[in-house]
Each structure stands twice: as C-alpha cells, then as structure tokens.
Amino acid sequence: MNQPISVSQLNIQIKSLLETTFSFVYIKGEISNVTYHNSGHIYFSIKDNNSTLSCVMFKGNRKNLKFTLEIGQEVIISGSITVYTPRGSYQLLASNIEPSGVGALALAYEQLKSKLEKKGYFNKDIKKTLPKYPKKIIIITSSTGAAIQDMKKIASNRWPLVKIQLIDVLVQGEKAKDEISNAIKIATKLNPNIIIVGRGGGSIEDLWAFNEECVCDAIYESNIPIISAVGHENDFVISDFVADIRASTPSNAIELALADINEVRFYIDNLYNDFNKNMKIILNNKKLLLSNILSSFKQNSIKNKFDLIESNILNLIRDFNNIFEQILNKKEQELNIIRDFNSIFEQILNKNQQELDLLKNSFKLNHPDNKIKDGYVQLTKNSKIVSIDNIKIDDIVNLESTKTLIKSKVLEINNLK
C-alpha cells in the first residue's frame, strides 16, 4: 500500500507541475472584480461564459499598463500560472495586458480624456488669456530638438523684445512625464508671462508623455497661461485640451504668443498719421472759432459803436447842409435871416463838435491802453465793478489795474464829508 503524502507536499507537486506546464499562457477574457491595491499590485479576475480565473499583476509589470482596468473590458493577457501553496489556489500572473480589438494607448487616451473632462479640466470658462505683449516666456522642451531652435528664430524675428528661457526636459520615454510636470511647477514660480510646453512631431508612443495624467494636472494647476505645442497640426494630445491655448506646432505657439513687431510698427504709423490729421482738423476748427470770436468782438467794440455815432452825426450834418442849401436858394434875398441862421447854425455846429470832442476824449480816457497810470485802480466785488460808497467793513474787494490784482479786506471806512 502506498504511503500517504501531506497536503503541503501535494500542493508543492501541483505547483511544480502547473508552473512548469503553463510557464507562458496567452488568454482572452472579460475583466471582473478589479482591485487596485495600495501596494501597487492589481488583483482581478477574467471570465468567459462558463469559468472564472483569478489574476494578479504585480507592481513591477504595472508600469507597462497604459490603460485602466475596468469591469466588463475584454482583454488579452500574457503571463504564467502560479500556485499559492498555503491555500492550494492558483492564479494567472499577468505580465502584459492588451485590450481586445483596440490598442492599449488608444484606450488609455480615451479613458484619461473622459476622466479629466468630467473633472472640468477642459472647461473653457477657466482658460486664461494670453498677454498681448509678454516680456518673458519659458519654453519647456528638449534642448536638442529642432523645435526650440525654430521657436527662438521666430521669436527673434517676430518680437525681439521678449526674453526666452528654456527648461530642458526629456520629451519621450518613461521619465519624460515626471520631468515635464516638474518643469511646469518650477516655471510657474519664475513668474513668466507665458509657458510653452511641447515638442516636435513623432509617433503616438513618442508623444505619449503629453497624455500622462501628472502632466495634465501640472498644466491645470498652473496660474500662468500655458500653450500646448506638441507634434504636428494633426496630432492631438490630452495636454492640448487642458492647456489654455492649443498650438498646431511649436512654431505656431510662438506666433500665438508674440505680436508681430512689423504689424505694431504699421499700427503706430497709422496712429501717428491719424493723430496728425485729427490735430490739423481740430486746429483749423479752433482757428475758425477764434476768428469768429474776434470778428464778433470787433463788431461790438466801443470803437465801432463810436464810429457808428460819428457816422450818424456826419449824416445829420450832410442832410442839414442839403436842407440849408435849399433854404438858401429860396431865401437868397432874405440876407438878415440868412445871417441869423448862420449864427444859429454855427452854434449848433459848435455844440455838436463839443459833444463829438467829449465822446472822443471819453473814448480815449476809457481805452484800456490809457488806463496805465499811477494811482488808477478799478474796485470790484464778487467780480462786479462797484462804487467805493457801497463798500462795507469786512467786505472782500479786489483792486485791479491793467497789470496787477490785489485782494483786500475792508478794515475801516471814514466819510470825508
């Protein structure tokens, strides 16, 4: 009779047999019961219509997994069978997992895009506006790539006043995502006006660092406007949707960030020409207004009024002479009357001449140019000419000459009568 063996021995024999026989399996099934453990391992099951198989992907292999395992996904797994002898259970040790019918990168892209969209990372209301004339731009890219040289060349031609600072990072490979996200955090502390994150074209694998969640988080959390400039015009990465502006190429990013200095020069020239044109119009209008005011002043001046009075007097004299001549023609024989009339007429002339002389003297005396005399001032109160007899104690009055104005307070009034 055979000697019995222990449970442990049996499990060890089963383990040796299974792990040797199934050292590599390639299996297709539907994901169920997914657990992402704090240790970094992923515990899950795959099933078909009739059976279920427990699976584990350890942390070391998880770094190759580009998408998130979700219940109901159909996947293809490569790995090996392992037996856990203390419980006598076996499971599939997954080394690689690919989605069935769709590429892993494409699935990971859509998963992260959907996740970030739900979190509001793509919300247009939170997008920051680029400054029109930035003084400092930080570019996060590889120092050895062609993109940085193209951007510097365009910047020097487009807006040479801007300061360009490069933060050199890896733009592809496993370490690229951490370098890019850390560079964005560093750049925000340097207070640039704009940050440009990008690289030249490449395959989806080459551009994948810009589809990583940590890079998108850093862009979203930045308080500085960020332009995403990855690949060519047809390349869309998730950082494009999170960034404030998406540029079709790195060169296009510089064109979006910087004004064209030649366009600004043309704009300034047009402003200058418009300013000169408008100033000429304004000056001509003011000149015309001043001319009208001067003409109006002349028409209403004392001299013009005096000239009008003088003209009226001369007209009266001429009319009188005409009448007198008619009388003389009729009364040639009445010599005595003519003599008397001549005497009266002479008196009238003298009287009118005296009045005319008085008007002329009054005009000369009241002309502003003749008021510059020692001791002559004009007394005003509240901007009105007043008589000294109407002044009271504590009144504030102005004493004005043609060249001087003195503001005074009345302290004492004495009547001279």
Image: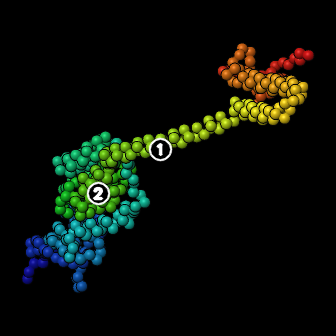
Q: Which mark is residue 278?
A: 1
Q: What residue type is disc 1 on? A: Asn
Q: What residue type is disc 2 on? A: Ala
What is the quadrant of residue 381 in the picture?
A: top right
Q: Residue at x 12, y 78 (%)?
A: 4
Q: Position of residue 232 (x, y in %)?
A: 22, 60
Asked whether residue 280 is in view, the answer is yes
* Label 1 secondary element: helix
Q: Residue at x 87, y 17 (%)?
A: 414
Q: Which residue is mark 2?
A: 247
Which is nearer the eye, 23 or 357? 357
Quarter of the image that includes the N terminus: bottom left
Which is nearer the eye, 21 or 145? 145
What is the quadrant of residue 375 in the picture?
A: top right
Q: Residue at x 23, y 82 (%)?
A: 48
Q: Position of residue 417 (x, y in %)?
A: 91, 16
Within 10 angstroms of label 1, few (less than 14), some, or many (20 or more) residues?
Answer: few
